[in-house]
Image (spheres, rainbow, N blue to C red):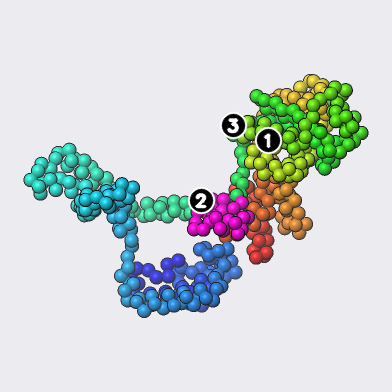
Amino acid sequence: MYAIKGGDNEDDIKIGLQRIVPHIFGSHENCKDADWCSYHQNPEKFMYKSLPNGKPLKSEGLKVELNNLVTKMIGRSNSLNDLGSTQSNESFNQLVSVKAPKSRHYGGSCSLQNRLSAAVLQKNEGYGYLSKINEAANLSPGEFTMAISAVRDQKMEKRKEKKNSKEYKVDRIQKKRNRNTNERKHLVREGKTYGSQMEFDQQQDPELTTEIPLPFYLDGTECKVFFDLETTGLGRNSDIIQIAAKSYSNSFNRYVIPRVDIQIEASKITGITYSHGTNKMYVRGQIVEPVSLHKALLDFIHFLKEQNQPILLGHNICNFDIPVIVNKLKEYNLFSTFCKTVKGFIDTMKVARKYIPKHDVENFKQQTLVKQFVGENYLAHNAIEDVDSLKTLYDSKLALLVKSDDVFAISYHNCMDSYSGLLSSKIVSRPVCIQLAKDGISLKHLKLASVRDVNGLKFVLQDHKIPPKSVKCIQDFFQTEE
């Protein structure tokens, strides 16, 4: 906002100063002739670019103080009409910092005056000042020094000519806008990262330190970890009795002591039984050594940490395995650690349904796909056997089909739950919520984005490829809430 400009006459400066305070407090009666205020072009959609949430200030105390400040400036408006650009001063300051950098503490040495004098001479005379000093001291100007000075002076003149061109100024303005946009995006995603008394601000409002996740893209450096669970029942609240996983270099398998009885149907499917009287577990008649659920989860996280950017792959894990293990991780306060360790998960059943035509297969069960595309039968519903067969199926059929869009965030179900209000109110469609949840964006993240920057919410939604119509609906929703 340029309410006053260098070169304006005294009356214009007074009028410009008188407009400032009413403008930022929402009164635009004096702004009709101001080219820097766009309120009268579209009053309904007008938003302040430099004020929080694009809304005017409201504090009466602040208004009084600002009016007092502006009144003082109006009283000396005759001295303001000669103001010009500060760029020449900034250029000279940069030149001095090269001759006498603060990191060297030349301020405590006797050479400081000579260094400042050299900066003044270079500013006034150009790089040829050294040769002129030599001549004044009855010394040879130096052929090499003169040659270097001429080249540098020539380059400096070319830079000046280029900087005065219209194309350069337009390019500079565009680069500045891009930098500001990138800075605002970082602020929206990460929150405030530097400032006075930040530690106290974070303690008062810890939500503002929450980082908004970026979209995740497969680049080939991540480690695929094939994963499966066996449980005491068929519901999401069942206890885990086996965790198995396998990467291309390591494997993991733990049997887990169940805290409840294994249902008969589940025992028939998995072949796993457990006697609470003798504390012994059997897998199809063979005794195995189980561990506690807490230890099994810790061991699994440790196994995943040894992999490079692990991504879990499993069949139908989005609907069953992931919700089950997430519930248990939350129970032992391990969910946040798990989320930091694992980059996401891929449900191979969803991949098969998405890319394999229905008429090519009888159904999309893992056993059916393995038999058709691998030509093998295996012992289903034993986690380690399921993992081995899934790895073979993935390598032979699914590896070339999987794309970045098939990766789900570990917090997917939590994020989807956060959108229940938006879905019930029909503010946005379910596919939009699924897209955001897949990338780990919850309603809380969107709220943080809208609080941190007036256009921050738009940045986040555009990054996650949300349609413009849905972006508008979500923005309107948060503006209505405020």
Q: Quadrant of the N terminus?
A: bottom left
Label 2 sits on residue: 182
In the structure shown, which secondary structural element does the residue marked by tag 3 occupy?
A: loop
The numbered mark at residue 221 is 3
Whether 188 is drawn above or below 268: the answer is below
Label 1–label 3 contact, CB within 8 A: no
Earlier sequence position, callout 2 versus callout 1: 2
**Where's residue 196, x and y in %?**
49, 58
Earlier sequence position, callout 2 versus callout 3: 2
Quadrant assignment, res 426: bottom right
> What range is drawn magenta here?
181-210
Amino acid type for the residue under numbered disc 1: Ile
Q: Residue at x 51, y 50 (%)?
A: 182
Q: Residue at x 12, y 45 (%)?
A: 134
The numbered mark at residue 301 is 1
Residue in the foreground of this view, choosing between 164 and 318: 318
